[in-house]
Image (spheres, rainbow, N blue to C red):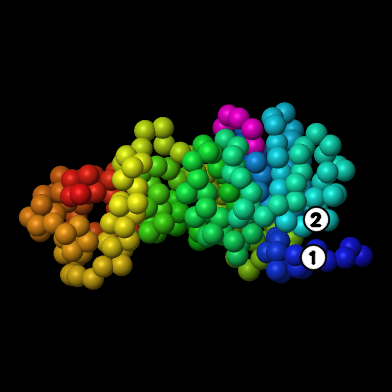
Amino acid sequence: MRSPSRHGGRHELGQNFLTHRPTIERIAALAAEADGPILEIGAGDGALTVALSALGRELVAIDIDEHHVRSLGRRLPGVRVEQADALRYPLDRPVLVGNVPYHLTTPILRRMLSEDRWRSAILLTQWEVARKRAGVGGSTMMTAQAAPWYRFTLHGRVLARHFRPMPSVDGGILGIERRESPLVPVAQRRAYDRFVRRVFTGSGRGLAAVVTSAGGVHRGRVHDALAELRIGRSALPRDLDAEQWAGLWLRLR
């Protein structure tokens, strides 16, 4: 029997290994659509690593479990396999792919969205995370803050039974693409982030009142901006798309 990793057991590491061959092939096909070397986050037992290595591209696979790293290194000598923490390892490859440990999804996403050295990402996360990040049923504050610089796409649902051991929730395939032309200048990102946070957490009756307070501008300007952007009076912050968020910011800043 294999000894536990010095970083903890399966539960501490949040390991749920993907076993569904069509999903593995789907993720590899999505990665193939993006150009450049690949960094795989959380390689685990190598199900995705094997499929990604078949693309014939430069591939670095990282995992925090030293046993998986040794095993993968022996099985895939053409792949650079490293023991590393995804919250610290340089995200310096154009393409990021990973079956993300569920308990680390939010910190990994926050780190990714603050880095500027990658272009495309295909992540397997919890279904609700993938759905919300893609704006299905309404966006989250994190998505709204990142939307002027990134596009989020939901590529499908992965049933819990397609993992080993089986988690308590389904997974979702989330695609993230860096926009070639940002909707808001990068120099304004910090200020824009604060504006979005104030709108999402602000109080007031109706979006116009909340935005007026968050933006510190005359209510008439807010009403004009909402009308120009075709944002209804009953809309909530979660209902706005990327262009509407950027448009509000650029009109009211």
- Residue 106 screen position, x and y as percent: 52, 60
Percent position of residue 51, x then y: 73, 39
Mark 2 → mark 1, Cα distance in angstroms:
8 Å
Q: Residue reaching furthest left?
A: 220
Disc 1 residue type (three-letter):
Arg
Q: Secondary structure at mark 2?
A: helix
Q: Which is more toward the observer, 187 or 157? A: 187
**Where is 213 relative to 175, above or below?**
below
Q: Which residue does the image show at 70% across and 36% down from the upper left?
A: 59
Q: Position of residue 119 (x, y in %)?
A: 51, 37
Residue 159 visible within the image? no
Could you tell me which residue is drawn at 61 percent across and 45 percent down?
Answer: 90
Magenta residues (range)? 34-38
At label 2, the amino acid type is: Glu
The residue wearing badge 2 is 66
The answer to whether marks 2 and 1 mark residues whose Cβ atoms lie closer than 8 Å is: yes
Dot 1 surroundings within 10 Å: few (below 14), some, or many (20 or more)? few
Q: Quadrant of the N terminus?
A: bottom right
- 159 or 9: nearer the viewer: 9
214 sits left or right of 20 in the view: left
Does residue 161 appear left or right of residue 105 in this picture?
right
The image's mark for residue 6 is 1
Main secondary-structure element of the magenta-colored stretch: loop
